[in-house]
Amino acid sequence: MRILFVLVFAGFFVCNSCNQQKTDWIDRSKHEGLHNITLSDKFETYATEVQPANLENTIKNLELAKAYFDKIFDENLNFAVLFVDNQNWDKYAFTPPPGMPQAHHEGNIILGINKSVMANGFEQALSQMPPQATQELKKYFGEPINLDKFFRDCLALHELGHLYQFYKTSKSSQRNWLNELFGNLCQVAAAKSFKNQTTFKQMDSYQNLLIRGNQWGELNYKTLQQFENNYFDVLKSGRNYGWYQTQFYTMAKELYSKYGDSLVTKFRTFLIDTDVQKLGELNDVELNEIIKKTFGEDVLSILKWDYPNSSTD
Ligand SMILES: [Zn+2]
């Protein structure tokens, strides 16, 4: 009896540990000093405050997006969301400015709380625009316009998309721009899958205004090559990164409207299959060949970048 018990227990222990290896990929060292706020039973939530305000919509968006991604990617992904205030941002996130949403490789997303530096900066920029230009935004973001709804509630979908990619890839990907295009594709696809289209209208009205308004000023970087070579520099300057993101967003919207969910899953498989650990680092010619073979000429033509590398790059 005792032997049987030991065997059963050992069997349970072994299975439990294999299971854990597969699902428990979250780096919990990143949660140090945070409160476990248990706002969802679908994923883990931590914050720099015991009871952070106004997170209901962010949580709802993430729960809906998780259900959608689990379905199209055939996963049941466990992940953690870290809600971090401006003061503590640099302790948990890998890059400023505070409130710029990001996804760590091992299962954590970082989002801002309260009025983030990121949202505040872009709200200031909006206040310089003529009132009729921002009229439509007030419908979706309230008055005064609250851009935390964009940077936290909408972009949470984008970051979650990255986690479904990172779960199956190594830390080294072929190109940052491919990752970002995939993030945008996930963001658009998840928002479109919601019954209530407010989240999609929020992201779309704001991104369209940024594109139409074209008030970026002087941008240091505009080519894909620069995006790869100066990635962290671009990230730190929220403005230049925002400009790149509007380019990826526009491509993602066109791709999704033409090819739907099947392209989102195909794109993820492509990122997994072209992982640097599997194929080594591909040059532009080799990468283009694989993109063409995987997706076809039509997709390749949508991926055409309007700001080609200059000879000085
Ligand atoms: Zn991203």
Image: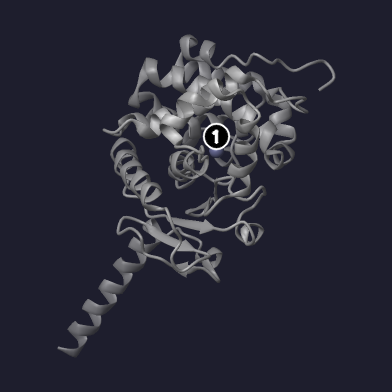
The residue depicted at 45 percent of the width and 36 percent of the height is 141
Residue sitting nearer the eye, 310 or 291? 310
Which of the image's four quarters has the N terminus?
Answer: bottom left
- As helix, strand or loop, the secondary structure at mark 1 comes to helix
Give the amino acid type for the residue marked by disc 1 in the picture: Asn
The residue depicted at 51 percent of the width and 39 percent of the height is 144
Residue 175 seen from this side: no
Picture coordinates of residue 6, whole percent (x, y): 24, 83
Residue sitting nearer the eye, 109 or 300? 109
The residue indicated by pointer 1 is 179
Q: Quadrant of ligand 1?
A: top right
- Disc 1 under 8 Å from ligand 1? The reply is yes
- Determine the image quadrant of residue 312: top right
Which of the image's four quarters has the C terminus?
Answer: top right
Residue sitting nearer the eye, 20 or 55? 55
The residue depicted at 53 percent of the width and 33 percent of the height is 274
Picture coordinates of residue 122, whole percent (x, y): 62, 37
Q: Is residue 164 left or right of residue 217?
A: left
Q: Is residue 115 left or right of residue 295?
A: right
